[in-house]
Each structure stands twice: as structure tokens, then as C-alpha cells.
Image: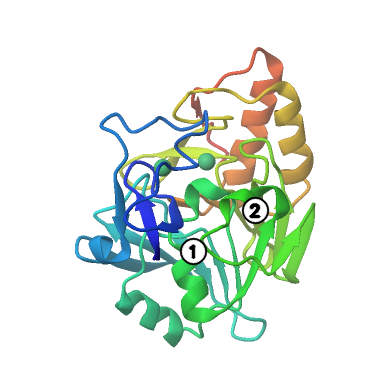
């Protein structure tokens, strides 16, 4: 029998024979730590007994979904509502309960589904099963897409509609991609950018890295590639797989990339200067 199982350590879902998969593809990669107490995999029923799904409209027409408590690294999924051109789902919460799926249905379901990279897929497979969207993935991330069927692989760029365009950045993972929302002046940046927020939710620090947990910086070539792909895009705010940074994200990224190229590579956070 085949079931979906989630890795407690990182939150990656895979489809495998019962009773349990032998290991987790994401945790076996050099970017992630192996689980110190050994593998622990949960079935959907086990996760459903423990987790609830929450959601909030973080910006007008943009909903964020997450879990309490979380599973793995606890990524959050976004739904960008566009009644005319079709709703876009990007990144995934670790688990979607039936109330969350009903709520997404009430907003018009999902026409296009994508994600930046495998670390923050969450339970995309549940959204694919519930809404049968077009599943758009950068082709180098396909080895991690066995839990659901990809209908639209792409290379450098995929325009879902004029208000939602995917760009391949690679580097953090081979298939890493970002979603540009020009109408909202936003970039869903995946793990290309990471922020620290203060108690008021204001971004105070920014970083970029090849591996966050392993604290491995990007090379200068990686940073120049991020500059070339991200900075020509018209955006101000950023949505990471954890939090919205509604303003100043591009200015902070511009500062970070310049600092990265001014000296040796680093994975530490950089304080964000005030741009007021
Ligand atoms: Zn894992
Ligand atoms: Zn990542």
C-alpha cells in the first residue's frame, strides 16, 4: 500500500510503501541536518490528529496558511486571489485540514500551483488532490516532486498570467525559483532572502545563503546571478515562506548583494539600514 508520509525533521512529504519510508531526500542533502534521534515519519491521519491549519489575509487579496503546532521547519503557504485570471498558490503549509481546504474553495480554489523549492513544499500534494490545479515547477526541482504530478515544467521563466510570473534562480537549490507579482509590487522570494523581524513585525536584518542550517554562504557567482535575476524585477515588498515584509525588501536585498560582493562570502545576517 502507498501512503503519503511527512518527515518530522524537515516537513517534506513523500509517497511510499507502508509502513514507513527508509529516509528523507531533503534531510539526506548537505543543506539539512539529519534527525538527531533517527527518522520519524507520520501519515496524514497522524498529522491530522495533532495539527490545525490557520490562515490570515496578510495583504489585500493574499492569504497565508500555517499550522499550529508545526511539522518540520514549518513553512507557510500563500494563496494570491485573482477572480479574473485564476488564483495562484505558492509554497505550502505542512498540512491543510478540511476547514482550510473548504476556505480555499470558498475563495475560488486554485488554478495555478507552484513553490520556490522542496524545503517549503509543505503538503502541496493535498492542494493538488483537492483542486487539480496546473502544477508549475522548475525542471531541476522535479526529483523532489514525486508526491504530486507536475503538469507544467519550465526552465528560466513561466508566466502563469501577466500578474504572476515565475523566474528560475537556482543556487540555493538547483531548481529554486521566485514568483513575481507585479500588480502587488511583491516578490515571493523563497529562500533566496531571509529576514529577521522585530516585535512589531518590522524587518531588521537580512541574509542570503546556500544552506541556512549548515551556515554555508553563496559564492560571489551565486550572488551575481541573484542580482541579475531579482533586481531587474519591479517590486518593493517580499513574501518569504515564513513572513511578509511588505516594504523595503528590494532595497534591503540590493544592499545585501553589494555587501556580499564587497568582501569574502558570508552567511550571517546584515542589519538593514533605514531607507525612510
Ligand atoms: Zn526530512
Ligand atoms: Zn531552502
CB of mark 2 near ligand 2 (< 8 Å): no
Q: Is residue 47 left or right of residue 121?
A: left
Q: Give ligand 1's quarter of the image.
A: top left
Please name the residue that numbered disc 1 is placed on: 124
Front position in the image: 49 or 226: 49
Whether label 2 touches label 1, CB < 8 Å? no
Residue found at the very far left of the displayed protein:
49
User: From what the image shows, is residue 102 above or below residue 205?
Assistant: below
Q: Residue furthest top?
A: 264
Residue 61 visible to the viewer: no
Say which element carries label 2.
helix
Q: Name which residue lies at 67% across and 46% down.
A: 175
Which quadrant of the figure has residue 111?
bottom right
Name the residue tied to disc 2. 142
Vertical placement of 222 versus 101: above or below?
Answer: above
How packed is label 1: few (under 14 Cα within 10 Å), some, or many (20 or more)? many
Of all residues shown, which one is farthest toward the front? Answer: 1
Q: Which of marks 2 and 1 is nearer the N terminus?
A: 1
Q: Residue at x 68, y 70 (%)?
A: 151
Pair 2/1: label in front: 2
Residue 178, image x and y in percent? 65, 52
Amino acid at each position: 500500500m502507498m501512503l503519503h508520509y511527512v518527515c518530522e525533521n524537515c516537513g517534506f512529504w513523500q509517497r511510499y510503501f507502508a509502513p514507513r519510508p527508509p529516509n528523507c531526500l531533503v534531510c539526506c542533502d548537505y543543506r539539512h541536518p539529519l534527525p538527531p534521534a533517527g527518522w520519524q515519519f507520520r501519515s496524514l491521519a497522524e498529522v491530522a490528529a495533532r495539527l490545525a491549519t490557520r490562515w490570515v489575509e496578510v495583504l489585500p487579496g493574499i492569504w497565508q496558511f500555517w499550522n499550529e503546532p508545526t511539522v518540520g521547519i514549518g513553512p507557510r503557504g500563500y494563496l494570491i486571489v485573482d477572480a479574473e485570471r485564476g488564483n495562484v498558490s505558492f509554497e505550502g503549509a505542512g498540512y491543510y485540514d478540511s476547514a482550510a481546504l473548504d476556505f480555499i474553495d470558498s475563495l475560488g480554489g486554485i488554478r495555478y500551483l507552484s513553490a520556490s523549492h522542496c524545503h517549503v513544499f509543505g503538503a502541496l500534494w493535498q492542494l493538488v488532490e483537492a483542486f487539480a490545479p496546473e502544477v508549475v515547477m522548475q525542471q531541476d526541482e522535479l526529483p523532489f516532486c514525486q508526491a504530486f504530478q507536475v503538469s507544467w515544467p519550465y526552465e528560466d521563466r513561466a508566466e502563469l498570467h501577466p500578474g504572476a510570473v515565475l523566474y528560475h534562480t537556482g543556487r540555493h537549490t538547483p531548481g529554486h525559483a521566485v514568483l513575481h507579482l507585479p500588480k502587488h509590487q511583491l516578490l515571493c522570494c523563497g529562500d533566496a532572502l531571509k529576514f529577521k523581524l522585530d516585535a512589531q513585525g518590522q524587518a531588521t536584518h537580512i541574509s542570503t545563503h546556500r544552506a541556512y542550517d549548515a551556515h554555508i554562504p553563496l559564492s560571489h557567482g551565486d550572488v551575481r546571478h541573484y542580482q541579475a535575476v531579482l533586481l531587474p524585477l519591479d517590486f518593493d515588498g517580499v513574501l518569504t515562506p515564513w513572513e511578509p515584509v511588505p516594504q523595503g525588501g528590494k532595497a534591503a536585498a540590493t544592499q545585501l548583494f553589494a555587501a556580499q560582493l564587497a568582501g569574502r562570502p558570508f552567511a550571517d545576517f546584515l542589519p538593514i539600514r533605514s531607507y525612510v
